[in-house]
Amino acid sequence: MPMNRRDAVARLLENRGELLVVSGLGSPTYDVAAAGDDPRNFYLWGAMGAASLIGLGLALAQPRKRVLVVTGDGELLMNLGGLATIAVQQPANLAIAVLDNERYGETGMQKSHTAHGVDLAAIAKGAGFPIAETVADLAALDRLVPTLRGVAGPILAVLKIDTAEAPRVLPSRDGVEIKNRFRRALGV
Amino acid sequence: MDSATALDWRRQIHPLLKEAGIAQVAYVPDAGHTALIEACHADPDMRAIVLSNEAEGMGVLAGAWLGGQRGAMLMQSSGVGNCINALSLVQICRFPFLALVTMRGEWGEFNGWQVPMGQGAEAALKGAGVIVQRCDRSEDVAPTVDAALALAFDSEVAVAVLLSQRLIGRKKF
């Protein structure tokens, strides 16, 4: 039974502490905002394909902090080569959670590649991620969250979610402010 | 630095990046950047990050800045087109951004397939909101890169330095 996206993201971010979060454009940005606005959130509203690479640069710059990228299957698919780039660098403090509804949700719910059998966890494994798993229910996600928070990565977790659309929770779209707020929270 | 090294623009860029505190260097390889890429890999204060596509670089360098580090990008002109939508991240969030772009498709190019993107690179970068500065002579490289670093990081804008094919030399086969 696929998960509800808001339930899944709430579990990912529960008691997040100093976790640094990057959200991919579209619903993952709304999901992360719905779990609670935080200055340590960098919300993307565009630049499709950039979320996991921002996570890479951030993880390398802040090796003592944990970084979580929350993005969608379509967003990750736009820049699959990024998985190879991340794997070469092996950032131990980076985890990527892919909310996989097998759809391009913002554009009319067209089927994405994962609906046709493309296995993102297998691709990450092949690239060289030491941990790459697919989880299909909240119980399995609960077991995985401590790994995402603390085990040496890079880690890719594919979270199978249903296609239900959640009410939109819109964080700021002011990119300069989101950027500067994030840096202030880090003290950089 | 001996006089031969001082005269070789290829050896002058790495010390400038280092002095400016560049900690992450994201690149798609190019022959014109060979010495610089090797110097970045050999520098313990720099992380050299090989990309599979230039668009990845805008994300990596934005993440570096969010985390308090400075980054720079090395690429060739044929990769400019790959960057266009990703540059919207740089522009809308006003991330400081510096790309050093080695040019193809302009000076004695033997491979016509390099010409369209090489000739379109400057206009494409400008169209995506990037300030473009061009080097045609070896003695211009160090001052131009130095000034571009200041412009990018002090004024928090996007800058590309184009290292012309005349400067680099015609590619011989």
Image: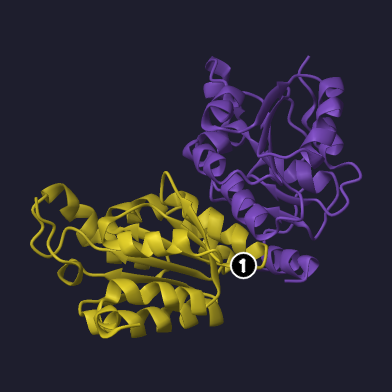
Residue A159 quadrant: top right
Chain letter, purple in picture: A
Please name the amino acid that badge 1 sits on.
Gln
Residue A61 quadrant: bottom right
Q: Where B70 sits versus A130, above or below?
A: below
Question: Could you tell me residue B119's position as x and y percent?
Answer: 20, 61
Question: Could you tell me residue B160's position as x and y percent?
Answer: 38, 70
Q: Which residue is mark 1?
A: B69
Q: Is residue A175 visible?
A: no
| Residue in the picture at 27% in, 70% down | B163
Q: Residues within 10 Å of mark 1 (few under 14, many from 20)?
A: many
Question: Could you tell me residue B129's position as x and y percent?
Answer: 43, 68
> Given the image, what chain letter belongs to the residue carrying mark 1?
B
| Left or right position of B14 against A146 | left
Chain letter, yellow in picture: B
| Residue in the picture at 29% in, 78% down | B5
- Identify the image quadrant of the C terminus of chain A: bottom right
| Residue in the picture at 47% in, 81% down | B151
- Identify the image quadrant of the N terminus of chain A: top right
| Left or right position of B9 against A56 | left
